[in-house]
Amino acid sequence: MATGISTDILIVGAGPAGLAASALLSMYGVENLVINKYGWLANTPRAHITNQGTMQLLRDLGIEDRAMGLASKQKLMANNVFCHSLAGEEFGRVLSWGNHPARKADYELASPTEICDIPQTYMEPLLLEAAASRGGKIRLNTEFLRLDQDDDGVTAHVRDRLSGEEFTIRAKYMIGADGARSIVAEQLGLTMTGQMGLSGSMNILFDADLTKYVAHRPSVLYWVLQPGARTGGIGAGVIRMVRPWNEWLVIWGYDSSQGELKLTDEEATAIVHQLIGDDTIPVKIRSTSTWTVNNMWATEFSKGRVFCMGDAVHRHPPLNGLGSNTSIQDAYNLAWKLAAVLKGQAGQGLLDSYSAERVPVAETIVTRANNSIKDYPPIFDALGMTSGDDPERVEALMAARKGADEAAKAQRRALNDAIRRKNYEFNAHGVEMGTRYASGAVVPDGTPEPGFTRDAELYYHPTTWPGARLPHVWLDHDGKRVSSIDLGGKGRFVLLTGPGGAGWRAAADNVAARLGIDLPVISIGPDGSDAHDVYADWFYQSGIQEDGAILVRPDNYVGWRHDSAADDAEALLDAALSQILARD
Ligand code: FDA
């Protein structure tokens, strides 16, 4: 057995969750080591929809521009198209991911960043570079086998897959980011709720020039509704753009009860041609793989010194595009907490807030993604595709909706309503951005939770209510245009105040010195303030009086706020930060 290695934080898994954790911990100056079973990163471009929550994290890491350079931009994601095949009849479209004029403003107002499409095969190398260039250690071909933990740390038993040699890695804490078949979660005995393996789905990655069928209706997802599309899978067939308009991924269901599926290139090409609806298109199959539809999340994310994140603790179909996004944002939630504990700035109790804050997110996104599958049958029903296997009868029913009689009118209404309902998959901005935390790392201010004036799944409702994401507004700062979220991040707490808030500055200096943390105070207000509220958006959005204060956590969530100036500012701030940091 080789001699062991030691590190502060061992991360098992180099997927989006593990690499984001490493990049953040490295930025915070925390020693960490990532191990990955395989010799490289994702070999198929699974995740792609990259929401503004993830983009804000990349912005904090200083790699947003690099990410945008790799991305297909928001406007290329404009449509979700429902069709019989790419070459065949189109049933309707949904303007998606904030591309509807009525939704564009919601997305632009929510964040300085843009929702975009970054295939996982591009995102992972970017995150790996962000981690390794900041000091994160990455060890490929290294397989996690099992773990022991005690009061002082965790011992992981691993195998070098090149030499076959087994050795141990000793860490103060460990992160299990080892995906949907997580051995770490299994060994911890994390309680799971829901079901795995609900149905089988296949990915066929291929090259083909489909410009003539797609360029006039740009999209990343073309939904193919054909008889057979409802066997297994995610509710319909999908032709997904990987790179416009030559690289694609077909997602098609299969009956997983018949055992493992092995596709030849000829069979894969036949499926691709069937979905394109034109077998004269030259197709080059790159790879095929299978995966299962899951509906499961863990009701606790950690035990002792081991924390799980990503698909290890939330497993669901790709609808809504939430998997990698949520995995990366798990890392944002945990990394600063581990850093604070390791630097002696926080008590261990802070780490309890990780499960408290992220389990409800897991439940929300797993449920949302599975509900999006349930929204497909009404589309098939309205088209008459659930009326048996006789193709002539199905065709007749599909054609019937074009008539002028009342039945045809009702059929059209049913189809249009069912397609519109898919806004809950393609424009669920509230699900993407609207998380509000409740835990020991959030100190309530005694005000009731702000209500939702619009549908909470579709619309993000920005607020500075403690536990909510810090709202974005544009400001001028140091001669530059910055977002309010740019004032925070980088692993630090910040205290935001305004005219009349000088008392908070003195309080913050004293509290920061006592707790041994960095706590910059930034005033937002008229010219001459640290940040100039040029559009007065902060004035209306801050939710407090100008001489009040908002304590922003390193993950850009509001930890606490106080409405106005206070004689006992130092005591108030000390109490709030001490609670968040679980300090005695
Ligand atoms: P992930 O599975 O990516 O990584 C796990 C890592 O652990 C891998 O590096 C693996 O090698 C390693 N590992 C496993 N066992 C190990 C062991 N014993 N020892 C060492 N290493 C080990 N999401 C999204 O946000 N937007 C989207 O648009 C889509 N679209 C999409 C389409 C399709 C077809 C699929 C199948 C999935 C998506 N997703 C998605 C989901 C997304 O791909 C998924 O949620 C993330 O990859 C999860 O990231 P993790 O880092 O948690 O696990």
Image (spheres, rainbow, N blue to C red):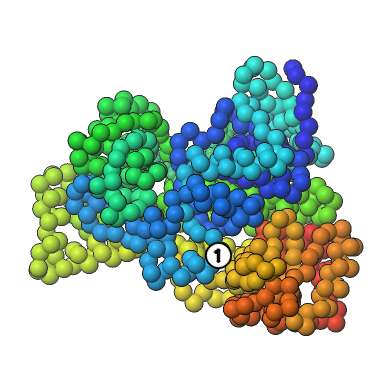
* Residue 101 located left or right of residue 29: left
Residue 270 placement (x, y as % from top left): 24, 33
Tell me the residue at 14%/61% (across/down): 401
Q: In which quarter of the image is the N terminus?
A: top right
Query: In this rendering, does residue 409 appear at all?
Result: yes
Quarter assignment of residue 172: top right
* Residue 34 located left or right of residue 266: right
Residue lying furthest front: 479
Residue 564 vertical position relative to residue 207 in the rendered view, above or below? below
Quarter assignment of residue 579: bottom right
Tell me the residue at 89%/68% (across/down): 510
Tell me the residue at 72%/23% (across/down): 167
Residue 354 placement (x, y as % from top left): 68, 53
* Residue 510 located left or right of residue 406: right
* Residue 403 located left or right of residue 471: left
Q: Quadrant of the C terminus?
A: bottom right
Kindly identify the amino acid type of the residue bearing the numbered disc 1: Ser
Dot 1 falls on a residue whose secondary structure is: loop
Identify which residue, 62 or 110, lies in the foreground: 62
Q: Give the tally of numbered discs.
A: 1
- Residue bearing mark 1: 111
Other residues around mark 1 within 10 Å, as few (<14) / some (14–19) / many (≥20): many
Residue 350 placement (x, y as % from top left): 76, 55
Residue 202 placement (x, y as % from top left): 37, 36
Residue 501 vertical position relative to residue 122 in the rendered view, above or below? below
